[in-house]
Image (spheres, rainbow, N blue to C red):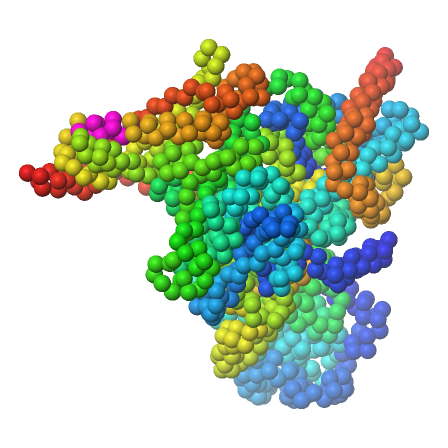
Amino acid sequence: MEKAKIKASQLFILVVLFEMGSAILLGLGVSAKQDAWLATLFGLAGGLLLFLVYYQLYKYYPSLPFTSYVQKITGKWIGRLLGFLYVIYFINMSTRVLRDFGELLTNTVYVSTPLIVINSLMMLIIIYAINKGIEVIARVGELFFGAIYLMALTGILLILFSGLLHPENLQPVLEYGWKPVFRTFIRETLTFPFGEMVVFTMLLPLLNNHKKVKLACMGGMILAGINVSLTIAINIATLGVDLYERSNFPLLTTIGKIQLANFIERLDVFFMLYLMIGCFFKISVFFYAAVVGATDLFQFKNHQKLTFPIGLMILLASVTIASNYAEHIEEGLRVVPVYVQWPFQIIIPTILLIIAFFRNRKKKATSSP
Amino acid sequence: MRKITVVTLLVIICSSFLSACWNQKELTDLAFVMAVGIDKGEDKKFSVSFQIVNPANVNLGQGSGGGQGLPIAVYSSSGDTVTEAARNATKQISRRLYYAHTNLVAISEEVAKDGLLNILDVLDRDPEFRTTTQLVITRGTPAIVLVSSLANLDKLPVNKITKEIKATEAMLGENMQITIDDFISGLLSKGKEPIVNGYKVTGDVEMAGRAGDLLETKTKAILSADGLAVFKKGKLIGWIEHEKARGVIWILDKVKSTAVNVDWGEKKEAITMAPLRTKTKVAAKIKQGKPVIDISIKDEGWISEVNTAIDLTDPNEIEKIDKLVEKEIKRQIMATVKEAQKMKSDIFGFGEKVHKKDPKLWKKLKGNWDEHFAELEVNVKVDSYSRREGIRTKPFWSNFNQ
Amino acid sequence: MSILSKILKKEQKRRQDDNYRQQQDPLKPEDQPILRNYQDNIARIKEEFGNSTDLCLREFSISNHKGIVVYIDGLADNKMISEFFLESLTEEIIDHSQDSFQKLMERAVGLGNFQIISNWNEVFDSFLSGNTLFFLDGYSKAINVETKGWNMRAITEPSTQLSIRGPKDSFTETMRTNTALIRRRIKSPDLWLETIKVGKISQTDVAIMYLKGIANEKIVTEVKERLNRINVDSIIESGHVEQFIEDQVWTTFPTTFHTERPDVVTSQLLEGRIAIIVDGTPFVITVPAIFIQFFQAPDDYYFRFDISTGIRLLRILAFYIALIGPAIYIAATTFHQEMIPTTMAIAIAAQRENVPFPAFVEALIMEVTFEILREAGLRLPRAVGQAVSIVGALVIGQAAVQAGIVSPVMVIVVSITALANFSTPSFGMAIAARLIRFLMMALSTILGVYGIMLGLIFLSIHLCSLRSFGIPYMMPLAPFNIRNQEDVFARLPIWAMKNRPKFISKDNMVREGENQKPGPSLEEDDPSSKGGS
């Protein structure tokens, strides 16, 4: 475990960047049609509840990362197995985000560039960052946080001034009732991006002020949730539901529509800027969690030794994980939420919490008299 | 581990440097396609023509020299799909066709009548295409004539067409900018049908692509915007023209300025009112289980021409004019609506309004909306205000007649 | 102060001696006493000094004791010594009762600060730093009189860091002058100065200056430690010291700040920074340095805050242009042609029609040409410099375009980049941008904007990982600290900058009193209310 310490404000920013990460880019909650933004807000609410589970676990073991306390809760061997599975899960998630990222670029601007080149260069940067440690990543986050907000604000202003916003596209609200919204919430928005907060169970012990964990994380989630929801609403209001549904990357299409004063047009590049920053943090956090977890499980002295092999693994897996974008998305929408996200984000932590609760009560009961 | 890192780094960096031209395209290797024209092919399905700009001949700066020869070159090729035609065209062109600056897609009336569905996807899917590319239908003439015609005011001929549409939208209100995206979203929506600008070349069509035509102040071939094409299920079914076209633009709330003539007393078309600001609101309401559309137009303008004796200092007179203008606008709008209803094509998006007003009712009507649209009750309400009358009060007619 | 510095000096000397013994340095005499016979002494000096011609030996006699004066011509004040000879030594001393050495000492008081030395290693130290030594026959000791007085450059206007408004003096090559320039500005006993000698052969004086109570003690000890660690034969410029005490070697960014302006050093000392003054150079180092500091020009604080803020933002923008200007040109013309407005794209295409090179090569040619031009202009004598700029303007500008080697747009890009680069107040930061620019150009050639962004993210990680004497380099930005934002992008009015940067001076933070906001005084009668009543 790295000795580094991060401030609460840095954790907050990391949470925001992580949660927004790729969620803003993709057409989140498409199956809820024009109520996608609503489904996202539901996802946020569910995510906050989920986070309370992680938080409770953290409160039992405030100085240990997930992979350590899971061993204390379930015993050494099961715990190690679980910890190992979580490391694999984190690796898998960063692989998926990296693939998303690469697909985005190869689908839009770099049509004839091989995916591996795009991904490997990004991975190089990330490995460099991970080697420098979480403190540096957090600081970079602070640097880019302002930049992202500035960009987002400019973007919104440009969309407004181009007269692209048609709020009537968001009507009628709840046309098909609550059912599709709820289904989207369970299938998509709860687990992605809000349930992914599970990765922060690895980072929470690094915070220098334990009291502020709840504030920083939940505040970050709320801000990110509102941002994502707002972006979706703007996308739908600009594009209309059917174009939103048909776009691989609705935000890109929205930005492409901006046309102002005859020369501010084709601002796709700004989309790319956001894309890179967002994905950088998302991959970094997952990657870092995986590295820290592996370091912790296999008792390495420092994490630098593991960054390169794990990084290489992520890179290679990101290229081989699916043969085309449709397959990748299919996996992401059908397989991953049900068979990966649900167990890892919801089921296992909840069970762990229940066991931990009884264990600690027993301990208290035995120690107090 | 460090060594491996360094080696891998070097390999990656070197390999990317050595083969660094995946997406790189030098400006001089690109053929900027400014406009694409799609006609019916002879043996293949489509004949596609590309207007390519010749940068050296577009005299933009002082230092760029050039100015010799024509600013554009047109190539055409055929294929069963647009992509195939585009690839076939490379046989004739020394550079890579580049569509990111394409401003115009012209489609001939013939093709439009057969349906645009087979053309649209490539325009929508290719990331290189701008979503803001304009769409026009050429009336009477093949699209290649439009694509290969020259213009004497604009350095890039394509700008003549796109700017012309913009200008008429702003000054006359009989055409509006319609992009590929607009068209597709109209096509997909159940409660709305797309419209497209019509364009035609009149006069000596043969002269359209010749440099000689530009040597005269009055070109022999005349390009002009003309009417709106009405589509249904992706097929051209008819045209709406002049005043009725303006009615469409008006209902769609795109009119910025125009001119409305009204009669005064005996004299026909005696007064012209030019709106400066207009705002159209379209609302649906449900009356006895049936949708009713209310169109309310509010416009403010100035009296730009008075060809009869009226005392414009008298507010009552102005009010009278306002009433006449209101009536005239209402008449035009109603005529437009009737025309569209006759074609059974909901180009105004009334269906979407109904959808938003009452989703349940819409579900019932949606399947057969065209029929419902044809019988739809539409109410028009116009509020017109003349705010100014230029720098004269009484027209000279007042003294002239005495 | 002097006690402390003496202790430090001794400590330093001992440590150095240890080093020398370990390395068996042949240049240094053993720790031997001075001989009684003055002729032997002279012979030894001459021998060890290789009969160097600037060694001055003047014999004299006092009360029948033969003696000799040793000093180095040019280092010691020649005039002073001559006058001393005229006044004190030529007149015959009748009184024989007194000890001759004692007598000599009494006279030497008139010359200046003196001390008695008896060891050989001190002999060289003393006259090599401009002192004069008096040997007297029959005594195994010598008198060391401070007679430093060499020709030094007068205090002139700063030549590299100009400002519109502000003091016009600058440091010189003499350390004493430099410390005096600072002391004149901070009249406080808390301004502490410690001197050590660095460089085995050169024995250069290096001074550490800081404000006791404001500077962070930890950093002060760290600086001392790092300076003491230096084991090198010579220190010629503060740049040498800089390279020995940096936190990180593998970076193009300067992690120490250097300046030749006393006002800058003063204000930095007052913020808790530590100045390192090296003898023989007008450039004073201050540490710790943070990124944003390199964009703060001295005028910023002398002009109104709103104007300064605007100008500072402009500078930061210029830094980015200098960094990625040509890279963006390359990316836009070879990858993202859709970004450029149509007419402009066609105009650029028309210009590039006759250029035989790809955009990257074109940019490289122009950039390299410009860098050569700049380098040539820098070193040339002023008279020739003019010619270079004419040639450069012709080559870079018109001729290159007319010959069809580059396009006019490229010339514009290069010129703007160059201008932007010049607008960074610190040369060290500007030169870092220059170097990285080429990397950015290469990246944008491979992958367009993606490459540029990769480069920028890499830079950000790198900058965030840098430290200067334990202080994170991007300090008030990352880690973000709201209280220290008063002098980052925006420069608040001086009266609103209540605190010193927290990250440097940990304890003593408040620098001004309450209610410093200016305004009409309350007691003053309000003219409007007067009129009313």
Q: Is residue B279 above or below residue C201?
A: above
Which residue is at 80% across, 42% downward? Answer: A323
Task: Determine if the magenta segment contains residue B318.
Answer: yes
Q: Position of residue A313 (x, y in %)?
A: 84, 45
Q: Farthest left residue? A: B402
Q: Farthest right residue? A: A77
Q: Is residue A168 above or below residue C235?
A: above
Please name whichever residue, C304 or B127, is drawn nearer the observer in this view of the structure.
Answer: B127
Which quarter of the figure is the N terminus of chain A placed in?
Answer: top right
Q: Position of residue A62 (x, y in %)?
A: 77, 28
Which quarter of the figure is the C terminus of chain A placed in?
Answer: top right
Side of B232 relative to A139 (left or right)? left
Please name whichever residue, B316 or C533, is drawn nearer the observer in this view of the structure.
Answer: B316
Task: Determine if the magenta segment contains residue C383.
Answer: no
Please name whichever residue, C368 or B256, is drawn nearer the observer in this view of the structure.
Answer: B256
Asked whether the viewer can see residue A12, the reply is no
Which residue is at 37% across, 26% downward? Answer: B334
Magenta residues span: B317-326
Q: Farthest front residue? A: B43
Q: Is residue C438 above or below residue A202?
A: below
Please name whichever residue, A7 or C371, is drawn nearer the observer in this view of the structure.
Answer: C371
Which residue is at 85% across, 28% downward? Answer: A70
Q: Position of residue B266 (x, y in %)?
A: 17, 32
Asked whether the viewer can see residue C445, the reply is yes
Q: Position of residue A216 (x, y in %)?
A: 65, 31
Side of B216 relative to C181 (left or right)? left
Which residue is at 91% across, 27% downward? Answer: A78
Side of A117 relative to B261 (left or right)? right
Q: Is the stretch drawn in magenta largely helix, strand or loop?
A: helix
Q: Is residue B124 above or below residue A170?
A: below
Tell me which corner region of the image, top left, top right, bottom left or bottom right, holds residue B342.
Answer: top left
Tell me which corner region of the image, top left, top right, bottom left or bottom right, holds residue C509.
Answer: top right
